[in-house]
């Protein structure tokens, strides 16, 4: 969903921190966090979560049964949300390109980049296998959407500085976790819920990695980190914003309670900001203080917007309920 329009962000401050120096300074932290991640991440098998017994040939080359809407028990909200989540995962080559270019492919940074990519790779595989085996979505529409979405590629709003990239992924991994988790909750199939909970667990570990990295960056370059956090939070867009029909899907996902402004504010932004004590950080320069104030003002505004959204959502759901009772 689009939280705010994209604005261009000015370059980092004048304290001498370049991306190259920050990458070098954070190498030790990356190594420590990578080792912590490898020690706690448990191997899991995507194929075990897919009900292959429900699968059968499709029409076309194999002359099987054509897809139709009634073949799956997945809810309309679950379908929309599963497709957005899958297409978002599908753009992994673009995300890999971005972080490999930004963080490099050497040393601990490179090991993390490749390991993260391998873990993300199984999310798209597992969700697609589930959708096709259970016939939850039109496979032709899905393939066309994938082609269209991936052909556009993904260009990050935050590729201009490594601190912006790190701040973005710290929030984005948590947003993805919540989005998978809530999709499972509303999908109408316990097997979808089980698979998405497993994927959400991976996203949580990714969030912890980036959040801890951001914490270390706040210690060595507090003003630059504050500026990056303020820029990212005030311009945040989900990585799937380029998906065909995204706005319409995002509206359904928001009303259905999978992901909306209230969730974004309460369950994504605030937990990370609180954990990093961003609003309590002291000892900032004038530039850092300005960024902190800008962030605080934005969060207040977002909270108010989220409350307005909830009122609209409640009214809409009440109208739907009344219509259902009348019909
Ligand atoms: Fe993922
Ligand atoms: Fe992730």
Image (cartoon, rainbow, N blue to C red):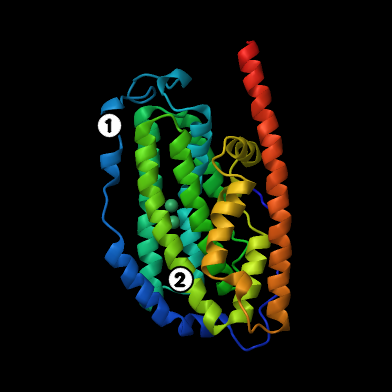
Horizontally, residue 53 falls left or right of residue 226, namely: left
Percent across and percent down for residue 196 are 40, 43
Residue 91 image offset from top left, x and y in percent: 49, 51
Residue at 55% of width from left, 42% of height from top?
148
Mark 2 or 1 closer to N-term? Answer: 1
Towards the viewer: 239 or 322: 322
Residue lying farthest to the front in this orientation:
280
Residues tagged 2 and 1 counted as in contact (Cβ below 8 A): no
Distance from mark 2 CB to nearest ligand 2 atom below 8 Å = no
Which residue is pictured at 34% across the width and 31% down the height? 133
Ligand 2's image quarter is bottom left
Q: Quadrant of residue 29?
A: bottom left
- Dot 2 alpha-carbon crowd within 10 angstroms: few under 14, some 14 to 19, many 20 or more: some
Q: Is residue 7 visible?
A: no
**Residue 244: quadrant of the picture:** top right
How many residues crowd around disc 1 within 10 Å: few (fewer than 14), some, or many (20 or more)? some
Q: Where residue 212 is drawn, which disc sits there?
A: 2
Q: Nearer the viewer, residue 64 or 26?
A: 26
Residue drawn at x 66%, y 74% as measured from the top left: 227
Q: Is residue 205 above or below residue 15?
A: above
Q: Secondary structure at mark 1?
A: helix
Whole-angstrom CA distance, mark 2 to mark 1, is 39 Å
| Mark whose residue sits in front, 2 or 1 | 2
| Image quadrant where one finds the C terminus | top right
Label 2: which secondary element? helix
Instruction: Determine whether, in the image, residue 49 is placed left or right of residue 13.
Output: left
Indicate which disc residue 197 carries. Answer: none
Residue at image mark 1: 52
Residue drawn at x 68%, y 72% is 292
Note whether 89 is above or below 213 in the view shown.
above
């Amino acid at each position: 969903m689009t939280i705010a329009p994209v604005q261009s962000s000015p370059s980092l401050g004048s304290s001498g921190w370049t991306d190259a120096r920050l990458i070098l300074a954070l190498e030790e932290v990356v190594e420590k966090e990578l080792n912590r991640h490898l020690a706690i991440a448990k191997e899991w098998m995507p194929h075990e979560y897919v009900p292959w017994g429900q699968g059968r040939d499709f029409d076309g080359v194999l002359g099987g049964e054509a897809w139709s809407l009634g073949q799956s028990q997945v809810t309309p909200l679950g379908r929309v949300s599963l497709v957005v989540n899958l297409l978002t995962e599908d753009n992994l080559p673009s995300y890999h390109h971005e972080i490999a270019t930004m963080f490099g492919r050497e040393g601990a940074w490179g090991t993390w980049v490749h390991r993260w990519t391998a873990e993300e790779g199984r999310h798209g595989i597992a969700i697609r296998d589930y959708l096709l085996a259970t016939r939850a979505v039109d496979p032709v529409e899905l393939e066309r959407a994938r082609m269209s979405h991936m052909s556009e590629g993904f260009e990050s709003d935050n590729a201009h500085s490594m601190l912006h990239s790190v701040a973005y992924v710290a929030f984005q991994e948590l947003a993805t976790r919540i989005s998978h988790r809530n999709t499972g909750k509303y999908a109408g199939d316990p097997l979808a819920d089980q698979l998405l909970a497993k994927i959400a667990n991976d996203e949580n570990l990714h969030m912890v990695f980036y959040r801890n990295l951001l914490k270390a960056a706040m210690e060595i370059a507090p003003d630059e980190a504050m500026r990056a956090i303020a820029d990212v939070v005030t311009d945040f867009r989900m990585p799937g914003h380029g998906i065909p029909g995204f706005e319409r899907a995002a509206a359904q996902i928001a009303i259905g309670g999978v992901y909306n402004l209230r969730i974004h504010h309460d369950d994504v932004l605030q937990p990370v900001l609180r954990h990093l004590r961003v609003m309590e950080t002291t000892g900032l320069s004038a530039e850092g203080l300005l960024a902190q104030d800008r962030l605080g003002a934005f969060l207040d505004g977002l909270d108010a917007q989220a409350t307005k959204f909830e009122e609209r959502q409640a009214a809409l759901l009440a109208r739907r309920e009344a219509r259902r009772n009348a019909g």
